[in-house]
Amino acid sequence: MKSVLGDLQIVVERHSNVLKNNALPFHVLLALRLIGFLLSPFSSFLSLLPIQLFSIEIWRIVTSAFVGKNIVLLAWSLCSIHFGSLLLRQASSNEAILKTFGITHVLTCIIVSIISLLQFIFFRSSVLLYESPIVDLIGANTAVLVMIKQFLPDSILLTTPAGRIKYTHLPFCGIFLAFIGSFTGIFHATVFWQVLTGVQVSWTYLRFFNPHESDAVYGDSNEHFTWASLFPRILQPACTILGRICFRSLAKLGVCKRQVRHVDLHSLHTVPINLPGLDSSARDAERRRQKALRALNERLSKTKRIETIKWEDDEEQTVEDKKVLEKSIPEVKTEDIMAEAIHDMEPKEVIEERE
């Protein structure tokens, strides 16, 4: 027995990376959901009514995720798990995605059951508590919408005549469509509350409690992932005020904590940064320098040209002066010059005798 367990542990260790990085867990979820749809005639034994949670039938929280008779919710679950996992696996691990799915589903079931009980207590309405079952992977579906919004906030999903739908609009679109479906009777009344609660739970977990693999920081404090960003731009100012009030109240109760980041200055490294503004100013400075050099070269070439012109004028002037001097000196025959030279070379006695 020990040898079998040892061999099994070795196999698990060898293939753990494969299980963590491939789509096998999500394929298992899809297969279980299809099997649950085929078992719809027996859904009463697997689904979860809010009242059953208070009767300590906790195992229904797990089984209710894979049953449901509504074909629209089935299609949503299949598309959400399949295509959503393809996008999310590029930015997160399978373990983190499945953990978010599980937390969102469990807390959604508990919170919707509490809402149903409060509705029965204050309004004497038993529709949610006794008649509307909690079924399908709606918690995981809403978590997919919120996680896609977190990682791809500005990417365009669809362009319509009324405007562009981005990934950041997916959570609100899911809430709106769930409200329309519940209002028109396409879905059970609990579906709207499941979607609304799932969006809030998944956002809260990813915003404040999701651990990072690289450091000890929890959550996501980016500005594009605030609570107000879950709503349309028209409603965001009012939602920002409401979100701050709720956050401060929860912070005082100790549910949420303000994120404090500690930075070790000794561990920081210099990073070369190329800013467009600095690049343009550098190009302008280089352009001005080249222009100044061209102007200086032109000025120097002009001065050299002027000096060469003056030098040529001086040479022409000297040549003309020489010609004038030659014209002013009388011409002397070469014979006379030779006779004078010979006369100067003869002794004085010979000259006197000749005279």
Image (spheres, rainbow, N blue to C red):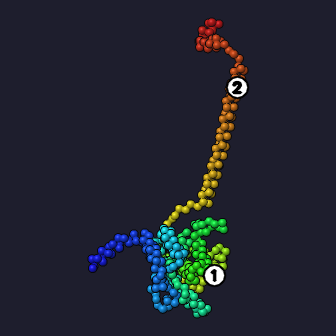
Q: Amino acid at mark 1?
A: Leu
Residue lying at the far front in this picture: please name it. Answer: 41
Residue 179 visible in the displayed image:
no
Q: Quadrant of residue 297?
A: top right
User: Which residue corresponds to mark 1?
Assistant: 242
Q: Quadrant of residue 306?
A: top right
Q: Amino acid at mark 2?
A: Glu
Q: How many marks?
A: 2
Residue 323 visible in the displayed image:
yes
Q: Which mark is residue 143?
A: none
Which residue is located at x 30 percent, y 77 percent? 5
Viewer-proximal residue among 40 and 286: 40
Image height of 15 relative to 348, above or below: below
Label pair 1/2, CB-CB below 8 angstroms: no
Viewer-proximal residue among 191 and 149: 191
Residue 144 in the image, given as x and y percentages of width and height: 52, 74
Image height of 92 relative to 63, above or below: above
